[in-house]
Image: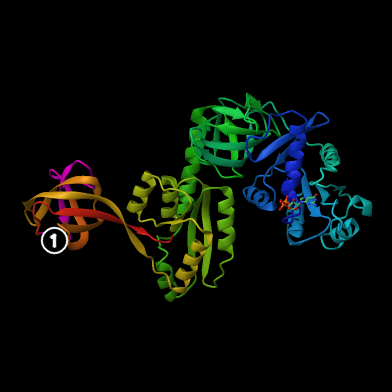
Amino acid sequence: TVMGHVDHGKTSILDAIRQTKVAAGEAGGITQRVGAYQVEKNGKPITFIDTPGHEAFTAMRARGAQVTDVAVLVVAADDGVMPQTMEAIQHIKAAGVPMIVALNKIDKDNANPDRVKLELSEKGHVLIEEYGGDVPLVPVSAKEKKGLDELLEMILLVIEIADLKANPDKPAAGTIIDAHLERGRGPVATVLVQTGTLGVGDNFVIGTVFGKVRALMNEDGKKMQAAGPGQPAVVTGLPEVPNAGEILQVVESERAARTIALSRIESRRKVAQAAAPKQRLEDIYAALQQGGTKELNLVLKADSHGSVEALKGAITRIEDPQVRIRVIAEGVGDVGESDINLAAASDAFVVAFAVKVDNNAQTAAEQQKVEIRKYNVVYHLTEDIEKAIKGLYEPTFKQVYEGKAEVKVPIKVPKIGFIAGSQVTDGKLTRNSVAKVYRGKDLLIETKIAGLRRFKDDVREVAQGYECGIELDGFQDYQEGDVIEAYVLEQENP
Ligand code: GDP
C-alpha cells in the first residue's frame, strides 16, 4: 500500500510502476482500475493496492482486514513531512507493518532530501537506515521514472526479511479491495487472496451473503482459473456489492455457505433489535427540545466507495454537543430491502447518494416507515442534518406528474357517496397521490386520492388502459368527461 500526504505523488508512483509492466510488454494496455495490480520484479510478483492514501487502509483495518505486508510512505522531497504524512506514519506503525520511504520528486530544483530525512526523524519519529534506523529510504522521481526499479527491489528485500508465508493448499480466504455494480455482469469485486487458492466454482460467504465464483479475471481482464495467496482477482457471481474490507471466505458447499450467512443475519438482527424506535430527521429538533442528547443514525448507500468515504468525512465534521451522528452501515449500490430492514431495526434513516431505491426497498420503507433521503451533493446532506439539529428543517416537496384518468360515470357507493368510474388514459394512478380534477380547462379541486378500486377490490395503483373507481378526498361531484390528474410528491432537496 502506498501512503502519504496529498500531492506528494502517490498516484504518480502507482501509475509509473504499472507502466513499467506495460512497457515490458506483459499486458496489452490497461483496461480499467480494479483496485489492485501485480507487477513482476526479478521473477517475483508484487501486488500493489491501487487506492492510494490511508483512508482505504484504515477502513479495511477497522473491519479487521490486514491486506498490507509492506507500506510505502511517499514524501515529496520539496515539501517534507506534512500532516497526512504524520497520519500515515501513525497508521503504519499501528498496523505493525514494515515501512519503506519513497522520497519522491527528487527531480525538482527545490528538492531538499536532507531536510526531509531530518523531519522524518524529528517530527515523524521515523529513523531511516542512513541515520542508524531500520527504515529504508529510496529516492525516486515518478515524473522522470527514476528510482522505481530500486523501489521494487527494496520491496522484495523487505518482504524477504519479513519471511511471509501462506498456504495455497486450502480453501481460500481474502479481502474485498474494491467492488461495484456492472451492467451485464452484476456485482463485481476485486478480492485479494490472503490464504489458500480461490478457484472458479468455489462456494463462498461474504458477511451475510453467499455465492459461487462464476469467473475470475486478472486486472487486464484475462480469465484466470485460480488465484493464490497475495494475488488479486476480479470475481463475478456475487449476490450483491460487498464493502471494501469485507472478508470472502470459501466454504465446502452451497449449503454450508447458506447456513453461515443465515446465522450471521440472525445475530445481526439481534444486535439491531436492541436499538430504539424510529425517528425522522424532522423529529430531531423536537427530541432535543425535550432535553438530553440524541443519536442520529444513518445507513449510507452511495455510488462508489469514494463517495461513502467523502460522506462519512463530511458527517464527522458536523459537531454538536447534543447530537451524536452515527453511520451504522454503509455500502455501494442501490438501496435494497436489507438496508431498509436494518434502518428500521436501528431507528436510522437511509441516505441514498447518487443511487436508486429498488422497488422492494421502496415498499418496505413505506411499510416500516423508514425515511429515505436522496442526495447528489455532499453538502446538501450535511446542510439538512445541521438544519435539523437547529430546528430549522423544513422539507420542501414538488409534484411530479404520474398519470391521468377520464371519468366515464359517477358511481354511487354505500356509505361513501359518489366515486368516479373512470379509465386511466395515461401513466398510472396511485392511492394517496395528489389529484387535480379538471372540467375542460377549469381546475375544480386539488386533493388526495383516498381510494382506488378495481371491481370490488381496493388496489394501490391502476395502470394505463384499465378501468377503475376513484375516490377523492372531499369531492364527489363528478361528470362524464372530467379529467383526474395524479401527482406524487417528491422531496426537493435536492
Ligand atoms: P497524490 O495526491 O499523492 O496521489 O499525488 P499525485 O500523484 O496526484 O501527484 C501530485 C502532483 O505532483 C502532480 O501534479 C504530479 O504531476 C506531481 N508529481 C508527482 N510525482 C512527481 C515527481 O516525481 N516529480 C515532479 N516534478 N512532480 C511530480
Q: Quadrant of the N terminus?
A: top right
Q: Position of residue 212 (x, y in %)?
A: 53, 29
Callout 1: CB less than 8 Å from ligand 1: no
Q: Tell me if mark 1 has few (under 14), some (14-19) or many (20+) residues whose alpha carbon lies within 10 angstroms of its own.
A: some
Q: Nearer the viewer, residue 26 or 238?
A: 26
Please check the rendered image and state whether residue 494 is part of the magenta-colored stretch, yes or no. no
The residue segment tinted magenta is 453-476
* Residue at 42% from the left image edge and 71% from the top image edge: 287
Q: Position of residue 335 (x, y in %)?
A: 44, 48
* Residue at 23% from the left image edge and 52% from the top image edge: 431
Q: Quadrant of the C terminus?
A: bottom left
* Residue at 50% from the left image edge and 42% from the top image edge: 264
Q: Amino acid at mark 1?
A: Phe
Q: Residue 415 is drawn in which quadrant?
A: bottom left
Residue that carries the numbered disc 1 in the rendered image: 475
Quick check: 19 above or below 277?
above
Q: Position of residue 361 (x, y in %)?
A: 39, 47
* Residue at 85% from the left image edge and 51% from the top image edge: 107
* 58 to the left or right of 382: right
Whether residue 165 can be seen here: no
Whether residue 266 can be seen here: yes
* 267 to the left or right of 422: right
* 243 to the left or right of 165: left
Quick check: 74 above or below 388?
above
Asked which secondary structure carries label 1, the reply is loop
Please check the rendered image and state whether residue 460 is part of the magenta-colored stretch, yes or no. yes
